[in-house]
Image (tube, rainbow, N blue to C red):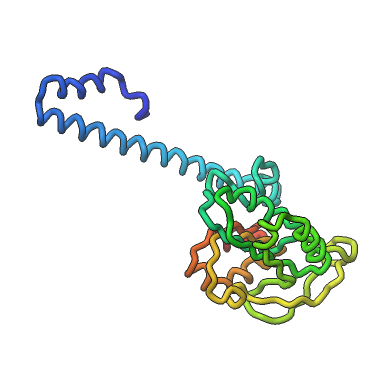
């Protein structure tokens, strides 16, 4: 291990300084720089190894339990914001696709420590939309004035789609009442506007929504937090 190099090795390099040997001094500096670079690479490789191990655990637990949620159900962080990976920038612009109860947007506000510029919040379900609208109205003006709540769904194209109502029926997908909702592609809605962070949880329609935001992704290169557990193939097709 690089961090366990014997101390006498350092002493040997340092002696070049004491002897006043310029060539030795340069050699000692070069050795130290190379060691520092090697240690940085070593640390990165350890992180990558940990990531690979985590991926293997996900695949193995999925194989055993046939449930992608199983390995990620217990987390100390907000569902779509991992602070060790995502670092907030100034004037973050958040797109919350599938708002539901607005909790993910509230998590974003808390995470964006340097402040945020805008939240685009898309929710097609009329009941969820009404509940979230009331919640936003109760927020401080400094926050609610930055939230643009949209009672539409997102898709690869503009139009009208049938959608299972969240608060209708038994809750089982096959028994839920279907409603018609207006949908729009994110590219056409934003029309060139900048975003920095996109969160998406749309009950299995994630790939279709991604196809409707290709221009936005290419232009803005936003952080993407996309739900991949609704369809088994999404963990491979999207991730």
Tell which of 40 and 105 is nearer to you: 105
| Image x and y of residue 110, in percent | 64, 48
- The quarter of the picture where the C terminus appears is bottom right
**Total numbered badges shown on the rendered structure:** 0
Q: Is residue 95 above or below residue 48?
A: below
Q: Is residue 205 above or below residue 106?
A: below
Tell which of 91 and 124 is nearer to you: 91
Residue at x 59% of width, y 51% of height? 112
Residue at x 79% of width, y 68% of height? 125
Q: Is residue 2 above or below residue 93?
A: above
| Image x and y of residue 38, in percent | 32, 37
| Image x and y of residue 56, in percent | 56, 45
Q: Is residue 233 visible?
A: no
Q: Quadrant of residue 118?
A: bottom right
Residue at the far right: name it: 169
| Image x and y of residue 65, in percent | 70, 47
Residue at the far bottom: name it: 159
| Left-right relation of 162 to 17 | right
- The quarter of the picture where the N terminus appears is top left
Residue at x 59% of width, y 47% of height? 82
Residue at x 51% of width, y 54% of height? 90
Q: Is residue 70 visible?
A: yes
């Amino acid at each position: 291990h690089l961090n366990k190099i014997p101390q006498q090795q350092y002493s040997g390099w340092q002696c070049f300084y004491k002897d006043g040997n310029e060539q030795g001094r340069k050699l000692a500096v070069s050795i130290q720089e190379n060691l520092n670079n090697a240690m940085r690479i070593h640390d990165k490789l350890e992180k990558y190894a940990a990531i690979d191990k985590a991926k293997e655990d996900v695949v193995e637990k999925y194989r055993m339990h046939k449930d992608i949620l199983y390995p990620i159900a217990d987390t100390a962080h907000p569902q779509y914001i991992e602070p060790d990976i995502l670092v907030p920038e100034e004037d973050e612009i958040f797109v919350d696709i599938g708002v539901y109860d607005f909790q993910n947007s509230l998590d974003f506000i808390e995470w964006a420590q340097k402040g945020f510029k805008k939240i685009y919040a898309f929710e097609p379900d009329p009941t969820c939309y009404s509940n979230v609208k009331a919640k936003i109205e109760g927020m401080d003006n400094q926050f609610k004035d930055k939230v643009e709540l949209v009672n539409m769904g997102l898709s690869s194209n503009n139009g009208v789609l049938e959608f299972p109502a969240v608060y209708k029926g038994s809750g089982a997908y096959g028994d839920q009442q279907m409603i018609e909702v207006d949908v729009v592609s994110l590219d056409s809605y934003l029309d060139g506007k900048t975003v920095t962070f996109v969160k998406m949880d749309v009950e299995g329609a994630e790939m279709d929504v991604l196809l409707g935001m290709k221009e936005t992704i290419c232009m803005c290169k936003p952080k993407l937090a996309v739900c991949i557990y609704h369809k088994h193939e999404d963990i491979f097709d999207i991730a």
